[in-house]
Image (cartoon, rainbow, N blue to C red):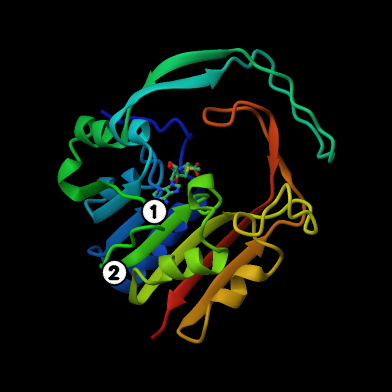
Amino acid sequence: MKTKSIWGNPPKRLYKLMKIAEKDFGEKYTACIVGCSDGKFLLPFARKKLRVTGYDIDDIALYGGQKSFPIVNEKNKYQYNKNFKSQEYELVKKRVLGITERLEIEKLSNYALIEKRDFYRNVPEKTFDVVFTSCSLHYTANKDFSLEDKTKKLQSIVSVGGYLYIDYMMAIEEEDYILYPKEKFYRKGEILNYFDDNWRIVSCKENNFPSFEGAHVDCVKDHFHRFGYLLAKRIK
Ligand SMILES: C[S@@+](CC[C@H](N)C(=O)[O-])C[C@H]1O[C@@H](n2cnc3c(N)ncnc32)[C@H](O)[C@@H]1O
């Protein structure tokens, strides 16, 4: 039985990355998702019977439990405005599946190693062919580390010849270090400074404008994000 992530379906870019990796490594490569949550980005690897490791610090995302969801009766979309104030939504608690439960239901537990680990505080001494993280760097749990440090910690677990994919949050107001602290939000082009000549940047896309996101689990107010996306290959 196929299960669903509370974060929706994985985007096309994940499958594109899997195709690139398959071209380089064939059908047997290792992958690691840093901040795997309930498995949105991890299950696709396990479904392909690849050995995949996932790290997260959120007990409910790992093992299942109750999460609060906003009750949104009418979906609205807003334009970005610095002084935007979200309406308050009522919340409802729902039981959600954790990644370990999803893997069990889909009979995929044998392909995945799921560990409760604070990755940026406790970097594993292992490397993988593909390392993927989506929006984990800006978490308050990681505010004691600079973005350079966190980016380099991710790089350290990529095998030579392997790929690092990062979806990251950028400052919506580049000069505002109060709302967008430098430890959490990248500035334009900043991430490229943290890749030395051991790396080839395959692609890097940074949005110039923020995109609207309606209230959702774990962020129960309407809000805006500005995203960056980077794929790099470790060449030495
Ligand atoms: C935004 S969620 C990923 C959500 C979803 N997969 C998506 O992007 O649509 C990021 C995850 O990273 C995890 N995370 C943040 N800091 C972490 C750390 N230091 N070690 C491990 N996981 C971390 C969070 O607990 C959270 O589950």
Residue type at mark 2: give it: Thr
The disc label shown at residue 219, or none: none
Dot 1 surroundings within 10 Å: few (below 14), some, or many (20 or more)?
Answer: many
Residue 152 coordinates in the image, percent (x, y): 46, 71
- Residue ID at (68%, 70%): 189
Element marked by disc 2: loop
- Residue ID at (48%, 47%): 141
**Along the line of sight, the residue nearer the viewer: 46 or 65:** 65
- Using residue 207 as the reference point, say whether residue 158 is left or right of it: left
Residue type at mark 1: give it: Val
The disc label shown at residue 34, or none: 1
Element marked by disc 1: strand
In this view, the residue farthest toward the front is: 144
Q: Does label 1 or label 2 sit earlier along the sequence?
A: 1
The disc label shown at residue 127, or none: 2
Residue 209 coordinates in the image, percent (x, y): 77, 51
- Using residue 194 as the reference point, say whether residue 207 is left or right of it: right
In this view, the residue farthest toward the left is: 110
